[in-house]
Amino acid sequence: MASAQNSAGIQTLLDAEREAQKIVQQAREYRTKRIREAKSEAQKEIEEYRKQKEEEFKKFEAEHSSGYKKAEEDANKEAEVKLQEIKDAGNERGGKVIETLIHALVDVKPEPSEKIVIKA
C-alpha cells in the first residue's frame, strides 16, 4: 500500500511539474508577445513624432522662405528705384558733364607745378 501511495505521490508531482512547465511556457509566450507589441507601439510613436516634426519643419521653412522672398523683392524694388534715379540724373546732367569734359580737354591752359623750379 505504501508503494501505491508513493506511486500516486510521484504521479502527482509529475503532473504538477508538467503543469508548472505549461505555466512557464505560457508566461514566456506572453512575454515575447508583449515585447513585440511594445516594439510595434514604440515604432508607431516614433513615426508619429517624426511626421509631427517634419510638418513643423515644413511650416517653419515655408514661413521663413517667404520672408526671404519678400526681402529679395523689396531689395529688387529699391535697386530699380535707385537705378532709375541714376538714369534720370544722367539724362538731366549728362549733356553738361560731356560739354565740361570736352571744354577741359580742348581749352588746355598748362601751368607748371609748384614743385618744378624754372631757371631763367
Image (spheres, rainbow, N blue to C red):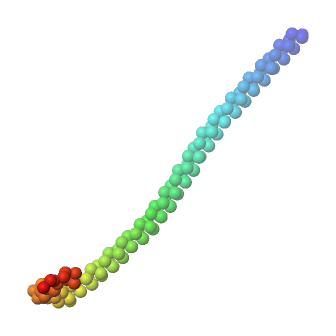
**Which percent across, then down, holds residue 108?**
12, 86
Against 60, residue 80 (above or below) is below
Work out whether residue 19 or residue 91 is closer to the camera in this orientation and state it: 91
**Which percent across, then down, holds residue 92?**
20, 89
**Which percent across, then down, holds residue 35?**
63, 39
Work out whether residue 90 or residue 78 is closer to the camera in this orientation and state it: 90
Residue at (62, 43) in percent of width and height: 38
Residue 101 makes an appearance in the image: no
Against 100, residue 35 (above or below) is above
Residue at (45, 68) in percent of width and height: 63
Q: Quadrant of residue 101?
A: bottom left
Q: Quadrant of the N terminus?
A: top right
Number of numbered callouts drawn: 0
Position of 108 with respect to 30 (left or right) is left
**Which percent across, then down, holds residue 100?**
16, 88
Q: Residue furthest right?
A: 1
Position of 109 with respect to 32 (left or right) is left
Against 24, residue 7 (above or below) is above
Q: Quadrant of the C terminus?
A: bottom left
Work out whether residue 28 or residue 76 is closer to the camera in this orientation and state it: 76
Q: Residue furthest front?
A: 120
Work out whether residue 34 or residue 63 is closer to the camera in this orientation and state it: 63
Residue at (30, 81) in percent of width and height: 82
Position of 75 with respect to 24 (left or right) is left
Residue 82 makes an appearance in the image: yes
Residue at (48, 60) in percent of width and height: 57
